[in-house]
Image (cartoon, helix red, strand yellow):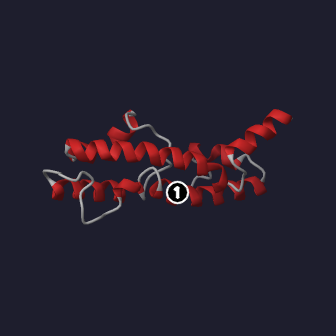
Amino acid sequence: MDGKVDHKWQALARLPPTDQVTCLHGLVKIHPAQLNHTFEWTVHSKEPLYETCPQPRTCQRALLDIRAKLSLMDIVGLETWGSGYIYQHFKELQKLCKGCSRVAENRFKKGRETFWELLPSCFGLPTWEELEKEAGSS
């Protein structure tokens, strides 16, 4: 190793040690939270996302492949459905039938909202509402 800090960790490296620990604990919580909320629709089930899916095996395989990629990725739980990032990194979305794709998008959006609401708790912080009140009183 050359002793250099990867660019995405430079900001973390500049924080005081106690804040670094808080951030790392938060990161450990973020990954399962994004899987269980923003991407909950990728969880394997015996039924396709869309009730009358014309290609259930293809759609289920695509969901499994997306889920497998998520465990290796950075934080993507706040990306938007139509973002280039999502389509660039999850080419399997193109394999979903139209019905499964619509269901996935709706569940993605709902899960993303839930993930956003839970985000402060990943770092041991109060809710967004409480944080806004606190910011307004200072």
For residue 138, side relative to residue 79 (left or right): right
Name the residue rendered at 71%, 59% in the picture.
21
Q: Residue furthest bottom?
A: 46
Closer to the camera in the image, 88 or 80: 80
Name the residue rendered at 67%, 48% in the picture.
12
Residue 5 at x, y = what percent? 61, 48
For residue 134, side relative to residue 107 (left or right): right
Q: Residue furthest front?
A: 51
Disc 1 target residue: 33
For residue 125, side relative to residue 44 (left or right): right
Name the residue rendered at 14%, 53% in the picture.
55
Closer to the camera in the image, 37 or 93: 37
Name the image quarter holding residue 17: bottom right
Q: Is residue 5 above or below residue 65?
A: above
| Quadrant where the N terminus is found in the figure | bottom right
For residue 103, side relative to residue 34 (left or right): left
Residue 51 at x, y = what percent? 22, 53
For the residue labelled by badge 1, is the local secondary structure a helix, a strand or a loop? helix
- The number of callouts visible is 1
Closer to the camera in the image, 10 or 130: 130
Residue 49 at x, y = what percent? 27, 53
Name the residue rendered at 48%, 45% in the picture.
112
| Quadrant where the C terminus is found in the figure | top right
